[in-house]
Image (tube, rainbow, N blue to C red):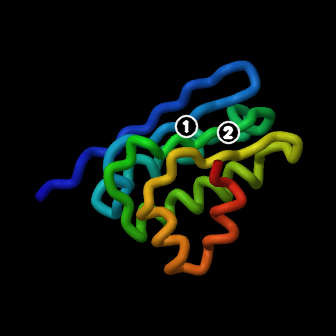
Amino acid sequence: MQAEKLKWSAVQNDDKITLQITGELSRDTLLPLWEQRFVLLSEKQIADKDILWDLSQISRIDSAGFALLCDLITHCRRIQHSNHRLIVANAPSQLSTLADLFGLTDWLNSFIA
């Protein structure tokens, strides 16, 4: 069975950017996102914005996808100004399961809306 292709989109409003990942976030699909992550999430683009990660369109996430998502969230928080928020919305149940497995539930819950 072939993995569902991963797509990435960003919609920017005045002081907010919505990032949406669509498809399967797995080791079989994440390479393009991994390669583009710092271009798509540059300091110039996100430092002075609230960030909403919309995960409603993720069909599957594995441990490699979870690791990448954690890395992206950490990257965003590192360069985002402290007066702006980062929210993870519509998290699939697999995300909570993986957070439990890796002991990151409290950390992840601090972002989940």
> Which mark, residue 51?
2
> Is residue 113 or residue 32 the one in the foreground?
113
The picture places residue 12, in percent across and down from the top left corner, at 62, 24
> Is residue 14 or residue 90 the one in the foreground?
90
Residue at horizontal 48 percent and vertical 45 percent from the top:
55
Provide the residue designation for mark 1: 19
> Which mark, residue 96?
none
Residue at horizontal 60 percent and vertical 80 percent from the top:
103
Q: Is residue 102 above or below residue 77?
A: below
The picture places residue 48, in percent across and down from the top left corner, at 80, 34
The picture places residue 45, in percent across and down from the top left corner, at 69, 32
The picture places residue 102, in percent across and down from the top left corner, at 54, 79
Q: Secondary structure at mark 2?
A: strand
CA–CA distance in space, label 1 to label 2: 7 Å
> Is residue 32 or residue 50 the one in the foreground?
50
User: Label 2 near label 1: C-beta < 8 Å?
Assistant: yes
Identified by mark 2, the residue type is: Ile
